[in-house]
């Protein structure tokens, strides 16, 4: 048998170190994709059970689901959907706060709530993966209104600075 040493850290260590929403989303999307294959492979008694101790983040920051858990048990066996939910809770609610992360975009809130068990649960991992993928594919288009607000803010700030500097210059001249 051949074993690979991917380097990196266990999921629990990475979460303890702290992840922002962009990192969390990327890892959750990768985990959902991996788990959707497991979920599709079997159902009922034949379904594969997995543990948090099987999630590994390699040196490149990529997520891997290992064949066997790392560490000494006992290990809590979860269905793929339960594992995705538990992982999301630890990433998003396990930051020492009582609510959702402050860097969580509003468009992601409903999906994260559902994954954390704070809303209607997803039917399966495939549905959760679809919701996470939709978040990644949503464009961050700048609307005309948003751009006009940005331009107005810059013009107002520039005008204020100009008038303040002019006032100071006139004050010094007199």
Image (spheres, rainbow, N blue to C red):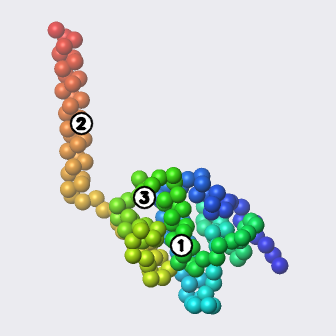
Q: Nearer the viewer, residue 132 or 92?
A: 92
Badge 2 crowding class, 10 Å Cα cut-off, few under 14, some 14 to 19, many 20 or more, is: few
User: Which of the two marks, 1 or 2, is nearer to us in this view?
Assistant: 1
Name the residue beneath numbered marker 2. 157
Q: Is residue 7 above or below residue 148?
A: below
Q: Nearer the viewer, residue 26 or 148?
A: 26
In 3D space, how far apart are the residues under numbered discs 3 and 1 (Cα atoms)? Answer: 16 Å
Label 1 or label 2, whichever comes before in sequence order:
1
Label 3 or label 1, whichever comes before in sequence order:
1
Q: Residue at x 61, y 57 (%)?
A: 14
Q: Residue at x 21, y 17 (%)?
A: 169
Where the C terminus falls, by quadrant?
Answer: top left
Farthest-out residue, top:
174
Instruction: Tell me where residue 104 sits by quadrant.
Output: bottom left
Q: Secondary structure at mark 1?
A: helix
In the rendered image, residue 21, in percent from the top left (x then y), is placed at: 47, 58
- Whether residue 37 is visible to the viewer of this picture, yes or no, is no
- Whether residue 79 is visible to the viewer of this picture, yes or no, is yes
Asked if disc 1 and disc 2 are in contact, CB closer than 8 Å, the reply is: no
Name the residue beneath numbered marker 3. 100
Name the residue beneath numbered marker 1. 84
In the rendered image, residue 55, in percent from the top left (x then y), is placed at: 64, 68
Badge 3 crowding class, 10 Å Cα cut-off, few under 14, some 14 to 19, many 20 or more, is: some
In the rendered image, residue 131, in percent from the top left (x then y), is placed at: 41, 74
In 3D space, how far apart are the residues under numbered discs 1 and 2 (Cα atoms)? Answer: 46 Å
Farthest-out residue, right:
1
Q: Secondary structure at mark 2?
A: helix
In the rendered image, residue 101, in percent from the top left (x then y), is placed at: 44, 56
Q: Residue at x 57, y 78 (%)?
A: 80
Where the N terminus falls, by quadrant?
Answer: bottom right
């Amino acid at each position: 048998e051949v074993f690979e040493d991917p380097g990196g850290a266990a999921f629990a260590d990475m979460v303890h170190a702290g992840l922002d929403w962009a990192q969390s989303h990327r890892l959750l999307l990768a985990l959902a994709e991996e788990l959707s294959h497991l979920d599709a492979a079997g159902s009922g008694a034949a379904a594969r059970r997995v543990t948090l101790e099987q999630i590994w983040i390699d040196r490149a920051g990529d997520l891997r689901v290992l064949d066997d858990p790392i560490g000494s048990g006992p290990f809590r066996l979860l269905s793929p959907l339960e594992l995705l939910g538990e992982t999301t809770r630890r990433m998003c609610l396990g930051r020492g706060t009582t609510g959702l992360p402050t860097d969580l975009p509003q468009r992601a809130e409903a999906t994260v709530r559902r994954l954390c068990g704070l809303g209607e649960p997803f039917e399966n991992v495939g549905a959760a993966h679809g919701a996470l993928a939709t978040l990644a594919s949503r464009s961050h288009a700048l609307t005309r209104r948003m751009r006009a607000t940005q331009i107005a803010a810059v013009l107002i700030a520039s005008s204020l600075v100009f008038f303040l500097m002019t006032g100071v210059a006139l004050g010094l001249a007199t």
